[in-house]
Amino acid sequence: MPYAQIGPIAVHFPSRIETADVWAAEHPEWHIQELIEKTGIEQRFIAAANETASDLAYQACTKLFEQNNIDPQSIDYLMLCTQSPDYPLPTTACLLQDRIGMRTNAGAMDFNLGCSGYVYGLGLAEGLIASQQCKRILLVTAETYTKFIDPDDRALRPIFSDAAAATLIECSPTPTLLGFEFGTDGKGANTLIVGDGGARCSEQAIQPKRRRRWNSRLYMDGQSLMDFSVVAIPDLVRSILSKSELTLAQIDQLLMHQATRKMLEMLQQALEVDATKLPIRLANRGNTVSSTLPILIDDLRREGILRANQNHMLVGFGVGWSWAGCVWKT
């Protein structure tokens, strides 16, 4: 029986970089140093006005193919995780399939999940490969959340960043992704939401949990998200360990969605681990939503921290509320 394994990853950021100095110059009343201490973010990447999620995805895929000598015609299935698609329809993955030169007898789909999306994508890829429907899958994450954010929004502007990542998922003769656990609680939908642009009319739309303070299309109740995460994620970690028949001591790295430094530090405390086991890498790229995990993996691979014959846990959580995790054997 074949199994899925995480292959090479390529990452792409837009060319425009916005630093904390810009926020301080425009909004001296924001107390920028306090914001940096909470978020851990000192700069973010911003897509151009005419640059979309598929543009970022295309660049990430092109890098992946060129850097690893991959023929796009060898890809059996393309999965694109995005909450900022180019159009309501057609499916952005269909546009990307044509643009990167995949063959036409291949699958392509979008799935709308944010911070948990990478792990959900790995779960879908595992099923496609285990059922022998596919041998080579391209898992792409791409977001342009900055397009939803008003420049005067103190809560969101210093956090979210645009990026894309492309991961090749291939066959392995032995299991490398174990103990998948998923979670969903739609009552948290009103804590992180873009309430317009869909088919639900404004009179019937979900209302933000608390008073809206800024004009961004995106609304976030950060405190509720932290409260949810600090309860749900330690429970998730324990469930994955139980299913995988491992202990926390046997996990080399806890690779968590890079939300904010404050949230990750709270999870470090809840799980009683330090930054060497639960790394925080936000300062120079911000919260890139569904791309934080592949970007983190790419970073740690380059630094030599992720090595062969290790156990790592991948955990995504946030908008929805939605969460997911698994053990990854390298």
Image (cartoon, grey):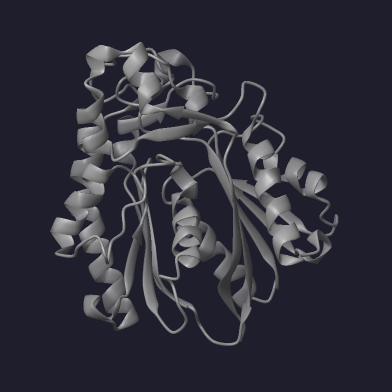
- As drawn, is 69 to the left or to the right of 267? right
- Residue occupying the point 82% across, 46% down: 98
Q: Nearer the viewer, residue 32 or 6?
A: 32
Q: Is residue 264 above or below residue 32?
A: below
Q: Where, by quadrant of the figure, is residue 318 drawn?
A: top left
Q: Where, by quadrant of the figure, is residue 260 drawn?
A: top left
- Residue occupying the point 81% across, 55% down: 102
Which x, y percent locates residue 188?
29, 38
Which x, y percent locates residue 280?
31, 53
Which quarter shows the N terminus? Answer: bottom right
Which x, y percent locates residue 316?
38, 54
- As drawn, is 166 to the left or to the right of 25? right
- Residue occupying the point 74% across, 44% down: 96
Decide if residue 309 is in sight here.
yes
Q: Is residue 150 above or below residue 313?
A: above
- As drawn, is 241 to the left or to the right of 13? left
Q: Nearer the viewer, residue 204 or 289?
A: 289
Q: Where, by quadrant of the figure, is residue 171 drawn?
A: bottom right
Which x, y percent locates residue 94?
75, 44
Q: Nearer the viewer, residue 81 or 130?
A: 81
Q: Is residue 184 above or below residue 325?
A: above
